[in-house]
Image: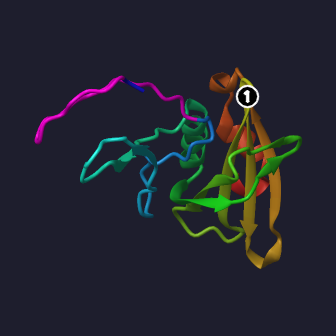
Amino acid sequence: MSDGLQIEAGETRALPFALTLPRETPVNLLNHHGRPLAVWIHTDLAIAQARDNDDRDWLEVAPTPQMQALFAAFETLGWGLYSTDVEAGTARAGQVATTLGCYQEFELRPYRSQWQLQEIELTFIPDGDACQVLVEIDARFGRDGYTVLTMGRDYATVDWARRLCERIPALG
């Protein structure tokens, strides 16, 4: 908030500000087949007689290093990010739950025909210094399942492709 100031027609003013986004803010800087996910902040200015006093300021939200590590492991196993969406509600992984009233799902599909698995959906849930990953496995012939991965501080030293094959044998 600032004291009054006058802005002339056609004049541009930049006012510095900082905003810390929640760790669950949906990610939209991803390479996938679906439409880019729209993420924005809504801004309002109290300007007398202004023609446009509110605005959507679009944000570019990059995946976390943990997300990148897991996406790379799936890529190694022949799975790529197909699409992403935001669901209303709460996602849970063990004792940890999302807090925004919505959560993002990342849908992965195999590059080549995979007779056992159709798709895998990932939901990343921040948990202090760690990240819990809810993995929903959509199998053919109705044998769906769930598993939870914990990506702790040591996530960068873990062989995630091997860990995924241990947790989801149909990937190997």
Q: Quadrant of residue 94?
A: top right
Magenta includes 19?
Answer: yes
In the rendered structure, the answer to whether residue 26 lies left or right of residue 153 reads left
Residue 32: % across, % down: 44, 57
| Stretch in magenta | 3-21
Residue 149: % across, % down: 77, 40
Residue at (41%, 43%) from the top-left corner? 43
In the rendered structure, the answer to whether residue 11 lies left or right of residue 39 reads left
Residue at (67%, 26%) from the top-left corner? 155
In the depicted structure, whether residue 162 falls above or below residue 28: above
Q: Out of 42 and 103, give the one closest to the viewer.
A: 42
In the depicted structure, whether residue 40 falls above or below residue 113: above
Q: Out of 170 and 37, give the one closest to the viewer.
A: 37
Give the total number of marks visible in the rendering: 1
Q: Among all residues in the image, which is located at the extreme bottom?
A: 141
Q: What is the chief secondary structure element of the magenta stretch? A: loop
Query: What kind of element bears circle 1?
Result: strand
The colour scheme of the drawn protein is rainbow
Residue 165: % across, % down: 73, 46
Check disc 1 and report the residue beneath it. Answer: 130
In the depicted structure, whether residue 139 falls above or below residue 76: below
In the rendered structure, the answer to whether residue 28 lies left or right of residue 55 reads right
Residue at (24%, 53%) from the top-left corner? 51
Residue at (42%, 27%) from the top-left corner? 1
Q: Out of 62 and 165, give the one closest to the viewer.
A: 62
Q: Out of 66 and 12, give the one closest to the viewer.
A: 12
In the depicted structure, whether residue 153 falls above or below residue 92: above
Residue 34: % across, % down: 45, 64
- Name the amino acid, label 1: Ala
